[in-house]
Amino acid sequence: MSGDVVLAVDHLVKSFRLHHQRANSLKQFIAARGRNRYEEFVAVNDVTFDVREGEVFGVIGQNGSGKSTLLKCMAGILQPNSGNVRVSRRMGALLELGAGFHPDLTGRENVFLNAAILGMPRKEIALHFDAIVDFSGLHTFIDQPVKTYSSGMYVRLAFAVAINVDPQLLIIDEILAVGDVSFQRRCMEKFVEFRDDGRTIVLVTHDMGSVKNLCDRAIWLEHGKAVDEGDPGDLVEAYTERMLGAYSRTADGGHRQGSGEIRITQVEMFVNAGTTPVKRFRTGDDVRLRLHYESEQTVPQPVIGIEIESVGGSTISAPNTRDVGLVPTTMSGNGDLEVSFAKVALLPGSYDLHTSITDFNRAKIYDRLQNAMRFDVMTGKPYETEGVVTLSPQWTL
Amino acid sequence: MSLRRALAHRNLLYLLSLKELRTRYKKSVLGWAWSLLNPLSQMLIFTVIFTYVFAALPVTGSPSGLKNFPLYFLGGLLPWNFFAITTNVAMGTVQGGAGLIKKVAFPHEHLVFSVVIAQFVTLLIETSILLIALVIAGQNVLVWIPVLLALYILWALFTTGVALTLAAANVFFHDVQYLWTIVAQVLFYATPVIYFASTIKLDALRAVGNYGPTGSFIVAFHDVLYDGRMPGAGRWVYITALATVSFAFGTWFFGKLSPRFAEEL
């Protein structure tokens, strides 16, 4: 915390014009006599913070909170309307891997071009070339045009270039979330190596886990304004709480379907013997879900179901009460019910939980709550790096 | 300002130019030969039209005594093509570089400069072949190479200015590229490539051919390549002024608009 300030963002304001009728042709422009009707949309509103040497600084916020705009201003891609950004170290901004790769050029040619775009002098590229190829593991393909690469190879090469450009200040936007699991782990290792080298990192991410684990300090943006700045643990907690509150509001709106005689109002998750609701657990934990419901009238033979979906959109499991023969003749009033799972076999990742209440034939939907809750599974036992669930394999070699 | 930044990133400029050159004829059987076949086919077409359709005679070059339409034509066409292709490709390069511009901070001018450099290399290769043809035709052009190079550099500066202006304007109004197709065509016919400016009877038209923004350069090229004489001092001053104004305006205009590219693209 005592290092020099290497990145100073000072009262930064960035707004965009939202055009009602954008003149894209000269004809329209002349017809409008040079006046474009537009609204000013302030994406980043008076944000100020400092990042010191050797710090890992997190930026959190919902989609549309201005994170990416802030990042682009820091990277010098967008010009702020007022305020300024001062950078006093060699900066590398990783907003997208492989931006500027040309499909017809070979891997070797693209390495040089890409590194030059990222601001590396020619001599240094030549010096780092072997390290780049080593990291990417693409020795045999380096003289092939990159259009022949698989997307995984493409990303590997791009990341290898980006990470070897050797910046003192690194700005990263979510890119650790690309590639397969083993590649992600390698990125993470490189990231930690970077941090331990005492380099400064600014990290923008949705992954609250990595903010908590990796960052020294964080800032929380909402509607372009800084809500709070400080210890990442506290910030993530406050942020998650706020997002949950915001969620149940939206849940009453667009995400709910059904006739509404009976509704699920809230879902709580408990892990092992815990009594406080949580949103994350580890592979192999015992998990209990408590579903709160309210009803306006008596509903005959309701079937309650839940669905667990991976972030990729595939249904992992969708149990319901009818399948186990648990269908009450009627249900009414308010209350809650529970479903528990022993030794959950989900592997690390994020999952969405949907709930539904239907009639006995599963035809009439009383209530379906899409995205009732999102939860994270962290590494536990058993540990596997690929796939979504573990079937507790017993290997014999 | 932008020039200093461009110099600081000259490695990027070098690699981008190399990319332009390398990717241009990838996947084509004849490759670089295309860059020569195109002007040659145009030469054939216009020679037939000039000689047989219009039944015109080429003006004798003085003092060279050269009387050869195809050589005259190529002497104007090659630099003209450099201008036309560079301006056209430059517009597309900035538009096509959207992915890069939105994700990485780098001097956007380089996208245009790299096109100019790649096309200039092409022009030099094409011209060297024309020079050989001129020597075979008995014209002692080799002594004029330094003068020709100086003229080419002025022409490249002029072209760069136009290309920068168009590329920047095209980001904001896409019809600039369509408009430019028409303007370029008008300019082509207003430039003495397929005709001899001196044979035009109408004073006003002759003046356009001789002193139009592009014509004034092309006439200078003809002076050197076809006639084998030094362009007049007045013409030197005039085209130097044109090149300077065009380049200065282009860099200023592009530099003014380029910070907004990332938002507009």
Image (spheres, coloured by chain):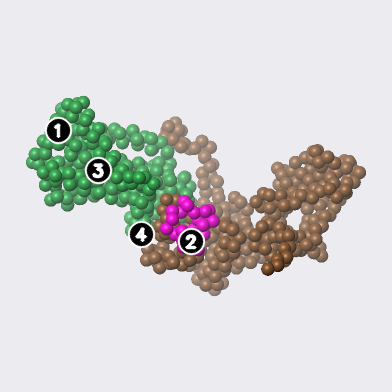
Chain colours: A brown, B green
Q: Which residue is mark 2?
A: A138
Task: Kindly check if marks 3 and 1 are in contact, taking CB atoms under 8 A apart as contact.
Answer: no
The numbered disc on residue A43 is none
Q: Chain of mark 1?
A: B
Report whether mark 4 lies on the same chain as mark 2: no
Residue A148 belongs to the span the image colors magenta: yes
Q: CA distance from mark 2 to mark 3?
A: 43 Å
Residue assigned mark 1: B58
Start-end of magenta stretch: A137-158
Query: Upstream in the sequence, badge 4 or badge 3?
Result: 4
Alpha carbon separation for disc pair 4 and 1:
46 Å
Q: Nearer the viewer, mark 1 or mark 2?
A: 2
Alpha-carbon span between mark 1 and mark 2: 60 Å
Q: In the image, what residue type sits under mark 2?
A: Leu
Q: Name the residue tied to disc 4.
A: B11
Asked whether the residues under marks 2 and 3 belong to the same chain, the reply is no
Q: Secondary structure at mark 4?
A: helix
Q: Is residue A297 left or right of residue B49?
A: right
Quadrant of residue B41 in the image?
top left
Q: Which residue is mark 3?
A: B79
